[in-house]
Every structure is written in C-alpha cells, then in structure tokens.
Image (spheres, helix red, strand yellow):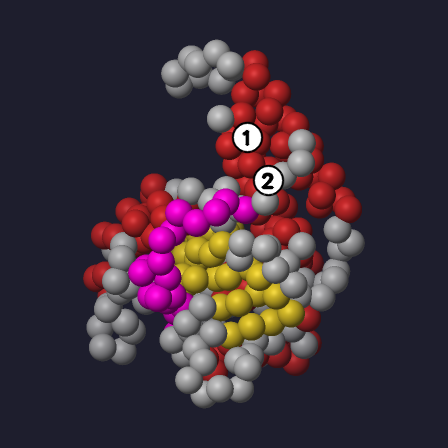
C-alpha cells in the first residue's frame, strides 16, 4: 500500500468506507431497544437533579496492568 | 495498517451511532415531558485535545476536600492508554453556557477481551461552577449501554466507583459484597 504522509490514499478511503458501511450494517442489525434515558420514570424525570452527584469512577488497579493486552477480536470485512 | 484503519473507523462509527441514539432519546424526552433546562445545549462527542487541555488546566482549579484531588494519572495519559484499543469507549460532554464551551464530564472504558463486558474505567465530572442539573452520568451510562449493545456485550461494569449509592438509580448494583467497588448491569435488548 502506498504511503503518502499526511494524505489519504485511495486505499485508505476505501478501507474507511468499507468499515463505516459495516458499522452501519451492524447498527441496523441490532434491534432498537429503550435507552437508559427512556427508562427513567416520568416521576423521576420531572424532579431530575443530578447536580450534587459525585460522578467519579477511578479504576486505579488497571494502572498496574499491562495495558497492551490482546486486541479485541478482528472485525470481519 | 489497513486492518488498523478499518477497526478504528468501524468502532468509531459504532460509538458515534450510540451517541446519536442517546441524543435522540434526550431530545424526544425533553420535547414530550419538558426538562430542557437540565439538558440544554449539550454536545456528546469524542475526547479530543481541547477536552484533555481543559481537564488538565481548568478542572484542578476546583478540586478540594469536598470534591476529589484528581486522578493518579492525567486524562491525557489515560486517553492514550485506552486509545490503542480501537474498540475503546470514550465520551466528552460539553455544554454551551452563555456562549462559552464548558467541559462537564469525561469517560473512558474498554471491552473485556471476550467482549462479554464493556468496562467503564474512568469517569470524572467537572466541579467548576455551572455544572448542569442533568448530570453527566445519565448520558455517559446511556452511551455506554448503547455502545455495549452494538458490541454484543452482556453487561456494563463500572470499575471502582467512588460513591456507589448514586449508581443504583441508574440500575447498577454490586454483587452484594460491601467491599466490592465494581457496579454491574446487564444489557438487555
């Protein structure tokens, strides 16, 4: 494959188009279901106030891991 | 290299689709039931350099004993750790407040090696004035769940939450061990 620094080659564009098409196929294939937003009750939605929530998640244990573990399963083209 | 580009584009598209679903859901709900003031002028997008700069330069100005003192690693380091996995999960939540783009929250995660779980490993809200009533958790968890569904994951795992009580209202629970700081939720289609 040709390498042109900083530019998109024809091959790269084709690969990306193929990937995006596959992703859209996947999106269409997964049945739409209620999102978390839609599952909030009407009562809760009416009085919703999350401004005081301490929204923090800190997986400090993972900092000790070898992060370069096996990549996810390859996506079929 | 073609495989790398393919995977990057594929999973990026899935993340974008998951955010679209959540934005649509928020818009529809606000139109039907009100509450616009809680969600007004929000943008859900990928983490970029601007978000990393704000997290590094602005957020620490508002850390104190009531908030937290920041994470052991910068968001920049965390982001580059996670980004090598094309299937990683990321989200930046911005809000336009009086014409000023304000970073309200960041999140990072990754699927487990078998894709059974989508692990959400880092979430941080802004503690600066002007934090919005909607809060970052609903959009973050909603996006994570939608992305998890697209990946074919069975559950979302929140790894080491700081205040576990607040996650229960979003449907997350531990396995019952009081020392367990991981909260989980099955994703049902």
Chain letter of the residue carrying label 2 = A
- Frontmost residue, A6 versus A69: A69
Displayed quadrant of residue B60: bottom left
Q: Which residues are magenta?
A: A53-72
Numbered label attached to residue B113: none
Quarter of the C terminus of chain A within the rendering: top right
- Frontmost residue, B130 versus B156: B156
Is B161 in the magenta? no
Would residue B28 be found to the left or right of residue B82 on screen?
Answer: right
The residue to which callout 1 is attached is B3
The image position of residue B91, as x and y in percent, is 47, 52
Calculate the distance from the C-alpha at mark 1 to the C-alpha at mark 2. Answer: 8 Å
Would residue A70 be found to the left or right of residue A23 on screen?
Answer: left
Chain letter of the residue carrying label 1 = B
Badge 2: few (under 14), some or many (20 or more) residues near its Cα, within 10 Å? few
Residue B168 seen in this snapshot: no
> Looking at the picture, does residue B188 appear above or below residue B76?
below
Residue B7 seen in this snapshot: yes
The residue to which callout 2 is attached is A74
The image position of residue A30, as x and y in percent, is 75, 51
Circles 1 and 2: CB distance less than 8 Å?
yes
The image position of residue B41, as x and y in percent, is 50, 53
> Looking at the picture, does residue B77 appear above or below residue A1?
below
SS under mark 2: loop
């Amino acid at each position: 494959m040709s390498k042109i620094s900083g530019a998109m080659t024809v091959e790269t564009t084709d690969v990306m188009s193929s990937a995006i098409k596959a992703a859209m196929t996947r999106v269409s294939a997964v049945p739409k279901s209620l999102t978390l937003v839609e599952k909030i009750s009407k009562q809760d939605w009416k009085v919703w106030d999350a401004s005081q929530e301490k929204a923090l998640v800190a997986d400090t244990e993972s900092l000790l891991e070898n992060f370069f573990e096996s990549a996810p399963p390859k996506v079929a083209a | 290299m073609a495989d790398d580009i393919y995977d990057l584009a594929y999973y990026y598209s899935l993340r974008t689709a998951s955010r679209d679903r959540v934005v649509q859901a928020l818009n529809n709900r606000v139109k039907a039931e009100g509450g616009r003031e809680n969600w007004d002028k929000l943008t859900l997008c990928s983490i970029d350099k601007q978000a990393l700069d704000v997290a590094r330069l602005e957020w620490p100005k508002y850390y104190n004993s009531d908030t937290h003192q920041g994470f052991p690693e910068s968001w920049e380091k965390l982001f580059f750790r996670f980004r090598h996995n094309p299937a990683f999960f990321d989200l930046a939540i911005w809000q336009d407040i009086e014409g000023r783009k304000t970073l309200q929250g960041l999140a990072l995660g990754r699927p487990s090696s078998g894709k059974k779980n989508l692990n959400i490993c880092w979430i941080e809200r802004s503690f600066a004035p002007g934090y919005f009533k909607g809060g970052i958790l609903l959009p973050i968890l909603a996006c994570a769940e939608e992305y998890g569904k697209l990946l074919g994951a069975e559950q979302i795992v929140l790894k080491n939450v700081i205040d576990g009580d607040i996650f229960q209202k979003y449907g997350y629970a531990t396995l019952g061990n009081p020392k367990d700081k991981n909260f989980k939720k099955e994703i049902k289609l």
